[in-house]
């Protein structure tokens, strides 16, 4: 895959199933704790977020291979299907978020997700807080990161 093979566009309600598949497959392949909600709840909740207050963008080749979901100050989700990892999809999505939000946005990453932590650190995000996980659905330690710009 090359950069010209990748299209970034706002998600539409028709993308809801594909976005959920990316989310579930990427989480299952990552060193993350088990999800705090059943798959069907995740699918319904993500579908409600497309056009429901969050900005959701998809990365498309011949199909949806990644997505980013964010608000004015937080990057809530950035997921890429396992077979497209390491091919620039995540970087393209993060660059889009940086351009749309500007300096100061934050995100949470699980301590156990060392690949994601390395990804964000290599792209200039810095750690601002650590928790024991008592405030998240998975009850797993996490780290807040911020993009200083």
Image (cartoon, helix red, strand yellow):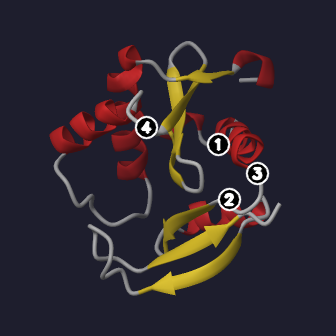
Q: Is residue 118 toward the left or the right of residue 39 in the image?
A: right
Q: Circles 2 and 3: CB distance less than 8 Å?
A: no
Residue closest to the eye, 69 or 17: 69
Q: What residue is rendered at 69% in x and 21% in y?
A: 6
Q: Residue 95, position in %: x, y?
A: 75, 42
Per the rendering, the mark at residue 119 is 2
Q: In the figure, residue 140 lies in which quadrant?
A: bottom left
Identify the residue at horizontal 28%, vertical 76% (top origin).
139
Q: Nearer the viewer, mark 3 or mark 1?
A: 3
Q: Name the residue under label 4.
A: 53
Q: Earlier in the sequence, mark 4 or mark 1?
A: 4
Question: Disc 1 to disc 2, how far (Cα)?
Answer: 9 Å
Residue 117 appears at what percent x and percent y?
A: 61, 67
Q: In this view, does 69 lie above or below 105?
A: above
State how far apart marks 2 and 3 are (Cα). 18 Å
Which callout, 2 or 3, points at the residue further toward the start of the chain? 3
Q: Do the residues labelled 1 and 2 touch (CB within 8 Å)?
A: yes
Q: How many labels does the image show?
A: 4
For the residues marked 4 and 3, what is the alpha-carbon distance in whole angstroms? Answer: 19 Å
Mark 1 secondary-structure assignment: helix
Query: Which mark is drawn over residue 90?
Result: 1
- Between disc 4 and disc 3, whose residue precedes? 4
Which residue carries the number 3 mark?
102
Residue 39 image point, x, y percent: 20, 43
User: Quick one: quadrant of the N terminus?
Assistant: top right
Q: How crowded is mark 3: few (under 14 residues within 10 Å), some or many (20 or more)?
A: some
């Amino acid at each position: 895959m090359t950069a010209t093979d990748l299209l970034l566009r706002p998600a539409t309600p028709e993308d809801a199933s594909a976005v959920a598949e990316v989310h579930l497959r990427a989480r299952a392949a990552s060193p993350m704790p088990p999800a705090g909600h059943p798959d069907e709840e995740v699918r319904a909740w993500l579908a409600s977020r497309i056009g429901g207050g969050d900005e959701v963008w998809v990365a498309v080749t011949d199909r949806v291979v990644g997505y980013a979901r964010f608000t004015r100050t937080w990057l809530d989700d950035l997921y890429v299907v396992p077979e497209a990892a390491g091919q620039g999809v995540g970087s393209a999505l993060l660059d889009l978020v940086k351009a749309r939000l500007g300096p100061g946005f934050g995100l949470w990453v699980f301590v156990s997700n060392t690949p994601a932590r390395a990804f964000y650190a290599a792209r200039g995000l810095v750690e601002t807080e650590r928790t024991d996980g008592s405030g998240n659905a998975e009850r797993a330690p996490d780290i807040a990161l911020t993009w200083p710009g």
